[in-house]
Amino acid sequence: MSSLTIGHAAKKAGVGTETIRFYERKGLIARPSRPRNGGFRSYSDAHVDRLRFIRSAQQLGFSLREIGELLSLEADANADCKEVHAKASRKLEEVELKIRRLRAVRAALKTVVSTCPKKGRAAGRCTILQALNPKTSR
């Protein structure tokens, strides 16, 4: 088991030291105790693995609260995989909803951009500005 400074643990996990401190404050990783003789706190390979888990879950769109729940399930010997599946399925539904909304935004932007004459004075005549103005887009 490695004994790493916060800087080395951060580098190994691909995060910043402030990120580690933030996760400690949020209770996502345990803060190592300070040695009695002073010196630096020691982070283990298990800390690095947990940091990587958190980052991977974030990249999949899980919030820190949800990541905490996943970590609790991982630590619970009696937890059922069905619970993890349910959380991941809910996240997938959220992502699919966001994609649908983004497609609608893209379509609206394409319409607004395609109607722009691309010339002339913007004030009072720009179709994009008119579309964004609630007074004129009725």
Image (cartoon, rainbow, N blue to C red):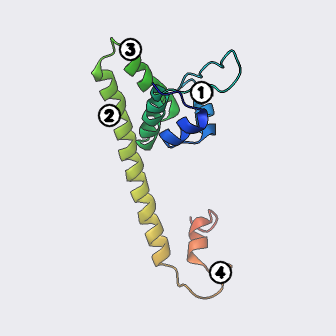
> Which-is-in-front pick, marks 3 and 1?
1
Q: Are marks 2 and 3 in contact (CB under 8 Å)?
A: no
Residue plotted at (41% across, 58% down): 104
> Is the N terminus in the top left, top right, bottom left or bottom right quadrant?
top left
Q: Which residue is more in the foreground, 40 or 124?
A: 40
Q: Are marks 3 and 1 in contact (CB under 8 Å)?
A: no
The residue pinned by badge 2 equals 89
Secondary structure beneath dot 4 equals loop
Instruction: Using the image as rendered, state which of residue 44 and residue 119 is in the foreground.
Output: 44
Q: Residue at x 33, y 15 (%)?
A: 79
Q: Nearer the viewer, mark 2 or mark 1?
A: 1
Circle 4: residue type? Ala
- Residue 26 percent across, percent down from the top left: 59, 27
Mark 4 sits on what residue?
A: 122
Please determine whether, in this image, residue 48 is positioned above or below residue 30.
Answer: below
Amino acid at circle 2: Ser
* Residue farthest front in this picture: 37
Q: In which image quadrant can residue 89 be found?
A: top left
Point out which mark residue 76 bears: 3
Asked which secondary structure carries label 3, the reply is loop
Of the numbered discs 3 and 1, the one sitting upstream in the chain is 1
**Given the image, on which type of amino acid does mark 1 rest?**
Glu
Q: Is residue 27 left or right of residue 66?
A: right
**CB-based contact (under 8 Å), mark 2 and mark 1:** no
Q: Residue at left 63%, top 38%?
A: 18
- First in sequence: mark 4 or mark 1? 1
Res. 46 image quadrant: top left
Q: Position of residue 4 (x, y in %)?
A: 55, 31
Q: CA distance from mark 4 to mark 1?
A: 51 Å
Which is nearer the N-term, disc 4 or disc 3?
3
